[in-house]
Amino acid sequence: MEARTNPMTAETNPPNLDVDLDVTSPEFKIAHDRLVEVFTHRSARGTENPDEPDTVQAMQIALNLPKQHPPSRHDLLAAAAQAVVAVCLNPQAGTDGEWSAALNRWYDHRIRKVTRRARNTGWQAVQNLPGVTSSVHGAQARAFIPSAVHEVEPLIRKLQIKGTDLPLADHQPPPRADTPTIYVDAGLGMSLGKAAAQVGHGSMLLAAHQPFDWVQSWARRGFELCVVETDPDVFAQLVDAPGAVTIRDIGYTEVAPNTATVVASPRP
């Protein structure tokens, strides 16, 4: 996958994303610095109070799930992971506008994600809302800037949460050389929606733990990555792999608290 560079600007136009990324801009660097800060000092954040609805923040993710010819599960998970990290590192996340304000409110509380399914007019209707759409081999996902859960945009709220699932493929393609890979513990039996949220966490954490020049290069490729759902024995070995980052779920849904759900690696 080769990004196109606009000769009139410093922007790159990754073919898999619906946004331009000026990875040389100060705003892109600020966006990455903010993401690093979030995970470096996570213990000082992450609070929410159900009695104060504005403290319960979430990023909404829409998965395009047409009835006819649905995409493969692993491609759709890869699209979701790319869309999430692209929202966090969009140069608008390094400004003082609403994009960065929405992310900062989310960063200051528990980093929840809610996955919804969309198709046809429902999918098209949300494309103009602030966010990023990513495509992987025809699979499409859009991540939106976060909001309080009681203030979700009406067009997004119309999209269903339940029924967001696809079967695990009998044969998954192996990780590609020199491509970041997110491994999912298939033994947990997570739904597509749950797994999409987890790989989104994984892409964020991977970007936060890599040097800035590595992240710049990754962004130029549209945050290209592979998602592989693997058996528990293999997954357990990956948890301690050098350079890998492990996501442990807080346990709101589907899995027990502190369960390792995904491992994100800068290389296969």
Image (cartoon, rainbow, N blue to C red):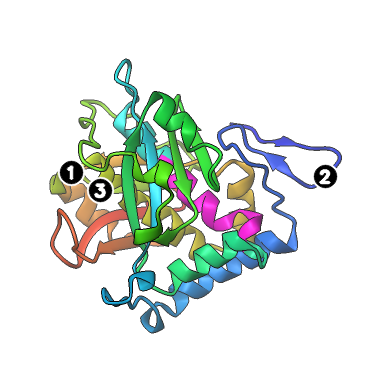
Q: CA distance from mark 1 to mark 3?
A: 17 Å
Residue in the picture at 46% in, 50% down? 84
Relative side of 208 to 167, left or right: right
Q: Which residue is mark 2?
A: 9
Tell me the magenta residue range: 80-93
First of labels 2, 3 by sequence position: 2
Q: Which residue is mark 3?
A: 194
Q: Secondary structure beneath disc 2? A: loop
Say few, some or many: other residues with alpha carbon within 10 Å of mark 3 (under 14 / 14 to 19 / 20 or more). many
Q: Quadrant of the C terminus?
A: top left
* Three-letter amino acid code of the residue under disc 3: Lys
Give the image quarter of residue 245. bottom left
Give the image quarter of residue 191. top left
Q: Position of residue 190 (x, y in %)?
A: 19, 46
Q: Is residue 244 visible?
A: no
On residue 231, the disc is 1
Q: Is residue 124 visible?
A: yes
Residue in the picture at 58% in, 56% down? 89
Relative side of 65 to 82, left or right: left
